[in-house]
Amino acid sequence: MDFLRDVRPTSEPGLEVALETAPGERAKVDFAQFHVVFTDEPATPRIVWLFSVVLGYSRLIWARFLRCHAAAFDAIGDPPEILYDRMKTAVLGEGETAALL
Protein backbone atom coordinates (compact mmCIF):
# COMPACT_ATOMS: atom_id res chain seq x y z
CA MET A 1 0.00 0.00 0.00
CA ASP A 2 2.78 2.44 0.78
CA PHE A 3 4.22 1.83 -2.70
CA LEU A 4 0.92 2.72 -4.36
CA ARG A 5 0.56 5.85 -2.28
CA ASP A 6 4.00 6.98 -3.48
CA VAL A 7 3.52 6.26 -7.20
CA ARG A 8 -0.17 7.06 -7.73
CA PRO A 9 -0.65 10.55 -9.14
CA THR A 10 -2.62 12.89 -6.94
CA SER A 11 -6.12 13.60 -8.17
CA GLU A 12 -7.24 17.12 -8.82
CA PRO A 13 -10.32 18.24 -6.90
CA GLY A 14 -13.40 18.47 -9.12
CA LEU A 15 -14.87 21.81 -10.03
CA GLU A 16 -18.38 22.36 -8.75
CA VAL A 17 -20.36 25.30 -9.97
CA ALA A 18 -23.50 26.07 -8.00
CA LEU A 19 -26.38 27.43 -10.04
CA GLU A 20 -27.63 30.31 -7.93
CA THR A 21 -31.09 31.81 -8.40
CA ALA A 22 -33.13 34.58 -6.87
CA PRO A 23 -35.66 33.65 -4.16
CA GLY A 24 -38.77 32.01 -5.59
CA GLU A 25 -37.43 31.82 -9.15
CA ARG A 26 -36.55 28.15 -9.62
CA ALA A 27 -37.27 24.73 -8.22
CA LYS A 28 -35.67 21.39 -9.06
CA VAL A 29 -37.79 18.25 -9.22
CA ASP A 30 -36.49 14.72 -8.89
CA PHE A 31 -37.91 11.21 -8.61
CA ALA A 32 -36.51 8.25 -6.66
CA GLN A 33 -37.66 4.65 -6.84
CA PHE A 34 -38.11 2.57 -3.68
CA HIS A 35 -38.87 -1.13 -3.39
CA VAL A 36 -41.07 -1.66 -0.34
CA VAL A 37 -43.20 -4.29 1.35
CA PHE A 38 -46.24 -3.01 3.22
CA THR A 39 -47.06 -4.73 6.51
CA ASP A 40 -50.64 -5.43 5.45
CA GLU A 41 -49.41 -7.18 2.25
CA PRO A 42 -46.08 -8.81 3.22
CA ALA A 43 -46.10 -11.20 0.25
CA THR A 44 -46.43 -8.42 -2.35
CA PRO A 45 -43.34 -6.27 -2.97
CA ARG A 46 -44.22 -2.88 -4.47
CA ILE A 47 -42.39 -0.09 -6.27
CA VAL A 48 -43.19 3.39 -5.00
CA TRP A 49 -41.85 6.65 -6.38
CA LEU A 50 -40.71 9.53 -4.20
CA PHE A 51 -41.32 12.95 -5.70
CA SER A 52 -39.16 15.79 -4.39
CA VAL A 53 -38.93 19.52 -5.03
CA VAL A 54 -35.95 21.60 -3.91
CA LEU A 55 -36.15 25.39 -4.08
CA GLY A 56 -33.09 26.82 -5.84
CA TYR A 57 -32.36 29.72 -3.49
CA SER A 58 -33.10 28.37 -0.01
CA ARG A 59 -32.56 24.65 -0.81
CA LEU A 60 -35.82 23.94 1.03
CA ILE A 61 -36.82 20.38 0.20
CA TRP A 62 -40.31 18.97 0.03
CA ALA A 63 -40.89 15.27 -0.69
CA ARG A 64 -43.85 12.89 -0.81
CA PHE A 65 -44.80 9.58 -2.29
CA LEU A 66 -48.28 10.61 -3.52
CA ARG A 67 -50.07 13.59 -5.12
CA CYS A 68 -46.77 15.07 -6.18
CA HIS A 69 -46.97 18.39 -7.98
CA ALA A 70 -50.20 19.84 -6.62
CA ALA A 71 -49.35 19.12 -2.99
CA ALA A 72 -45.79 20.44 -3.39
CA PHE A 73 -46.93 23.73 -4.87
CA ASP A 74 -49.64 24.11 -2.24
CA ALA A 75 -46.92 23.74 0.40
CA ILE A 76 -44.08 25.84 -1.06
CA GLY A 77 -45.56 28.02 -3.81
CA ASP A 78 -45.36 27.84 -7.61
CA PRO A 79 -41.97 28.98 -9.00
CA PRO A 80 -42.04 30.18 -12.62
CA GLU A 81 -39.26 27.76 -13.61
CA ILE A 82 -38.86 24.08 -12.66
CA LEU A 83 -35.91 21.82 -13.57
CA TYR A 84 -36.56 18.08 -13.72
CA ASP A 85 -33.84 15.51 -13.07
CA ARG A 86 -34.31 12.30 -15.02
CA MET A 87 -36.68 13.98 -17.46
CA LYS A 88 -37.19 10.72 -19.34
CA THR A 89 -38.69 9.25 -16.15
CA ALA A 90 -40.95 12.27 -15.70
CA VAL A 91 -42.36 11.87 -19.21
CA LEU A 92 -42.12 8.15 -19.95
CA GLY A 93 -41.79 6.44 -16.56
CA GLU A 94 -39.63 3.37 -16.10
CA GLY A 95 -40.10 -0.28 -16.87
CA GLU A 96 -43.05 -2.04 -18.43
CA THR A 97 -45.67 0.15 -16.74
CA ALA A 98 -44.28 3.45 -18.04
CA ALA A 99 -46.83 6.21 -18.52
CA LEU A 100 -47.13 9.96 -18.35
CA LEU A 101 -47.00 11.23 -14.79
Image: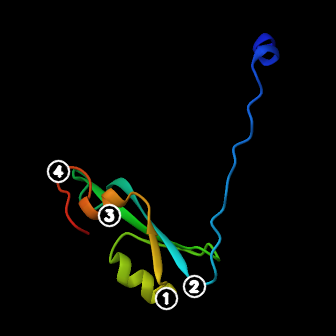
Residue type pointed to by label 1: Gly
Disc 2: which residue: 24
Question: Earlier along the polypeptide chain: callout 4 or callout 1?
Answer: 1
Question: Where 31 falls versus 21 (above or below)?
Answer: above
Question: Earlier along the polypeptide chain: callout 3 or callout 4?
Answer: 3
Res 38 visible: no
Residue name at image x 57 percent, y 85 percent? 24
Numbered mark located on residue 77 in the image:
1
Question: Where 65 falls versus 79 (above or below)?
Answer: above
Mark 4 to mark 1: distance in Å?
34 Å
Q: Secondary structure at mark 3?
A: helix
Disc 4: which residue: 96
Q: Residues within 10 Å of mark 1 (few under 14, many from 20)?
A: few
Q: Secondary structure at mark 1?
A: loop
Whether tag 3 and tag 1 are in contact, CB under 8 A, the answer is: no
Mark 3 to mark 2: distance in Å?
22 Å
Mark 3 to mark 1: distance in Å?
20 Å
Residue type pointed to by label 2: Gly
Mark 3 vs mark 4, foreground winner is 3
Numbered mark located on residue 90 in the image:
3
Residue type pointed to by label 3: Ala
Question: Earlier along the polypeptide chain: callout 3 or callout 1?
Answer: 1
